[in-house]
Amino acid sequence: MPVSSGGPSSRRARRRAARGAGLDAGRPGGCVVLVREDCRLHDNPALYAAAEEHEWVVLLYVHDEGDPSPWPVRGAGLWWRHESLKCFDANLRLLGSRICYRRGSYVEQVSDVLLESGAAALYFNRQLEPWHIKRDLSLESVVVESLGIKVRSFKGMVAAFEPWETKQKQKGEKRESLEKPLPTISKKLAAPPSGWPWSIELSALGYCNTGGAKIPSDFRQFNEKRQLHLQCGTGNPKTDDWAFHMRSFWQVGEHAAMQRLDEWIKDAAWGCYFPPGLNPKDSAGGRFRADKKWTAIICPYLRFGDLSPRYVCWRCRELLSYDLRRLFTKRVVWRDKAYAQLYRWPDSHSTSIRAHYEHERWSGTRLQLRRWQRGETGFPLVDAAMRQLWKVGWMCNHLRHVTAQFLIEHLDLNWKDGFAWYDYTLVDTDVAINAMMWQMGGHSGIGAWNFVMHPVFAGKKVDPEGSYVRRWLPELAHLPVLSISIVLGMHQQALGLQRMC
C-alpha cells in the first residue's frame, strides 16, 4: 500500500530527498532492523548484517493494529512477548542501542521510521506464517518502489529449512548439514546522527496487562477492575494477577534461555532425557517424566526468539554424542515441518486438512470442556497437567498428548476447542505447531496418532510416585499412595465419565 501523500511520512520524504541530494552515494548510511520473533543478540542474521554493513542501526518493533493473523498472540504468549522485549531492550542498551516501539499500521509505521531516521536500508528476519509472508511482501513493495530504500530479508527463524525450501530427499543424496549460527553481537551499535526516532513506552502496548484472578476463559487479556488495582498498588498480585505464578516459574530472556539449554544438555549427557532401553544410565522414564526437570523446557524461548533453533542444534552437536542428541534435535527440526505444513494448508488452524472430518459430529458438552480447561475432570493426571498449564503456561510434551487425547477420544470434543485453549494459555503458543499437533490428535491431519495415551495408565510412566499430581493438585497432597495418579484414576474410571456431565 502506498504511503499517504499528505501525511507526516510524505513531509519527511521530501525533507529526506532534499537533504540526501548532496550525500555521498557510496556511503552505507544507516539501517532499520525489524524486531519480531528474534529477541536475541546471538545468531540474529538481520541484526548481525546491519551491524557489520551500516554506520548505525535502529531496531524497531511495531504492534500491528491490523495484524492479518487469524490468531494474533494473546494471553500467556503476549505476557511472554512483553518480558522478552524488555530483556532484549536491556541487552541492547548495554551496547548503546535500544528498541523503538510503535503501534498502528505496520507498513506506515515502518515507512515513517525509515524516513524520520534517514536510513538507507531495511533488514528483517523472515516470518513464516502465510499471512505474515504476505504482509512482508507488501512492506517490501512500498519501501523499495515508493521510498527507494533497499530491503534485505534473512533466514533466521528455523533450524534447517524454510517452508518453500522443503524437498524430497533423493536416494543416495547426502543430508544437508545445518548452517553454523552467527556469532553474538558484542560491539557498540551507533545511534542515528539525527537522534532516535520517537517511540512509545513498551508498557503502552498493553502486553503486560494481566489483571485477573485466573486466565479468563472468555479469552480477554485482563480484567479492568483488577488491572486498575494492580496499577494503583492497591491490589494483591497473588490473587489479582493471573500471571503471578508465571513470573516466578520462568526466567525470560536470551541469557536465561542459554543457561536453561546448558542445564538440559548436562542432564542429557547423563541419559536423563531418553526413554528406557536407549541409554543404560536412564532407568526412570527420561523425557516422559512429568515429575522431573528432564525435558528441555526451552519451547517459549524458541517461539519468541530468545533462543535460536540453529544455535540449539549446534550446541547439542558440540556437547552431545549423536545417540544422545538425535531424538531432541529431530524435534527441533519438527518446528520447521510445522511451518511448512501451515504454508501449504494456510487454513489448517481452523479447517480439517482431511475435509470429510469437518462433518464429524461431537457429543461432548460445553460443561465437559469447561472442566477440562479448569482441571476438574476427576482424572488426577489430566487435572494436574491442565492446572499446571493454567498457572505457568506450560506442560511437558507427553502430557500435552495425554490431555489432548482425553479431550478428543474420551470427552468426544472437537480438536478445535483444544487448539483455541492451548493458543491462549501456552507461553509458547504457535499457530503452526498447534495446528499440526491438534489435527493429528483429531485424526484430520496429514498424519494421525497411532498410539493411545491412557489418562490413567500414563501415570505409571510420567508420575510413578505421584509427586507431580501432589504438586498441582494440593487437595490430594495428604494421600500416602505412592502412585496416586494411577490409583485415583482407576477409581474414577470405575465411576465413569458420566459424573462429568
Image: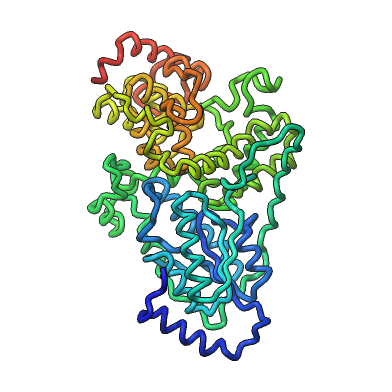
Where the N terminus falls, by quadrant? bottom left
Residue 445, x across and y down, in percent: 46, 31
> Which of the two residues, 131 or 94, is positioned nearer the viewer here?
131
Residue 440, x across and y down, in percent: 46, 29
> Which of the two residues, 484 or 115, is positioned nearer the viewer here?
115
> Which of the two residues, 36 or 383, is positioned nearer the viewer here?
36
Res 363 quadrant in image: top left
Residue 474 appears left or right of 186:
left
Q: Is residue 305 above or below residue 344?
A: below
Residue 25 appears left or right of 465:
right
Q: Is residue 93 visible?
A: no
- Residue lying farthest top? 494
Residue at 46%, 86% in the rendered image:
14
Residue at 66%, 22% in the rendered image:
282
Res 123 quadrant in image: bottom right
Residue 137, x across and y down, in percent: 50, 61
Residue 404 appears left or right of 154:
left
Q: Is residue 98 visible?
A: yes
> Which of the two residues, 259 or 1, is positioned nearer the viewer here?
1
Residue at 29%, 42% in the rendered image:
216
Q: Is residue 114 above or below residue 312?
A: below
Where the C terminus falls, by quadrant? top left
Residue 492, x across and y down, in percent: 34, 13
